Image (cartoon, rainbow, N blue to C red):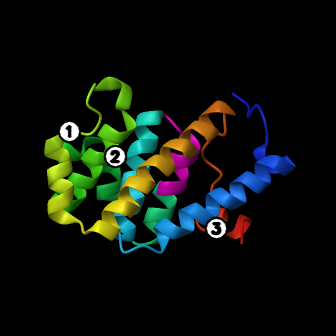
Amino acid sequence: MDARFNMLDNEIAVKFFKRFANASLVIHQSPLPKSTQELVSLRASQINGCGWCIDMHTKEAAAAGETSVRLNLVAAWRESTVFTEAEQAALALAEEGTRLADAHQGVSDETWAQVRKHYDDDQIAALVSLVALINAANRLAVIVHQQGGSYEPGMFAAAFN
């Protein structure tokens, strides 16, 4: 499968991605732990089948010191012992916020209560924004068939600075 369209070769798309990168910078600079940010992004990307984003967030997390054991277990986080309760709450929010069509209620009250238990308002704002942003990124990459495998850590940030 070849990419359908190179978004970085189009003026409108580049303008959009610069603004997208600015939104992502707000989340990156938030008090939400960086490891949680990458785990959430990775899990949503796995659900959405976005090879480009899985590649990016796996490599960015590893470059930031995340262990291969934890990265390999993200898809099975419920059956794993390597994630904190706070990370489990964030991963549940990521899953429920990504699979909106699968559940009539969206994010469950139980999951929301766990998120409230472990995160303050600024972290929750960042977490909710992150789930929305990574889902948008997944859709962009999947629509144009942007494939994973060639991403290098820091590549996204360098492209839009």
Q: Are marks 1 and 2 in contact (CB under 8 Å)?
A: no
Numbered label attached to residue 44 = none
Specify which label sits upstream in the sequence, 3 or 2.
Answer: 2
- Which quadrant: the C terminus? bottom right
Question: Could you say which disc has been placed on residue 108 in the image?
Answer: 1
Q: Residues within 10 Å of mark 2 (few under 14, many from 20)?
A: many
In the image, residue 117 lies at what x, y percent? 14, 61
**Residue type at mark 2?**
Ala
Return the residue at label 2: 94
Which mark's residue is nearer the viewer, 3 or 2?
Answer: 2
Give the residue displayed 36% in from the left and 75% down from the top.
Answer: 31
Residue 142 location in percent, x, y?
A: 60, 34
Q: Which residues are magenta?
A: 49-57
Secondary structure beneath label 3: helix
Does any portion of residue 152 appear in the rendered image?
no
Badge 1 or badge 3: first in the primary sequence: 1
Judged by depth in the image, the label closer to the viewer, 1 or 3, is 1
Residue at left 82%, top 48%?
12
Given residues 1 and 10, the one toward you in this image is 10
Distance (Cα) linking label 3 and label 2: 23 Å
Q: Toward which corner of the image does residue 152 lie, by quadrant?
A: bottom right
Q: Is residue 146 magenta?
A: no
Whether label 1 touches label 3, CB < 8 Å = no
Instruction: Report the Cα–Cα distance between label 1 and label 2.
Output: 12 Å
- Give the camera-side residue of 10 and 1: 10
Which numbered tag is attached to residue 157?
Answer: 3
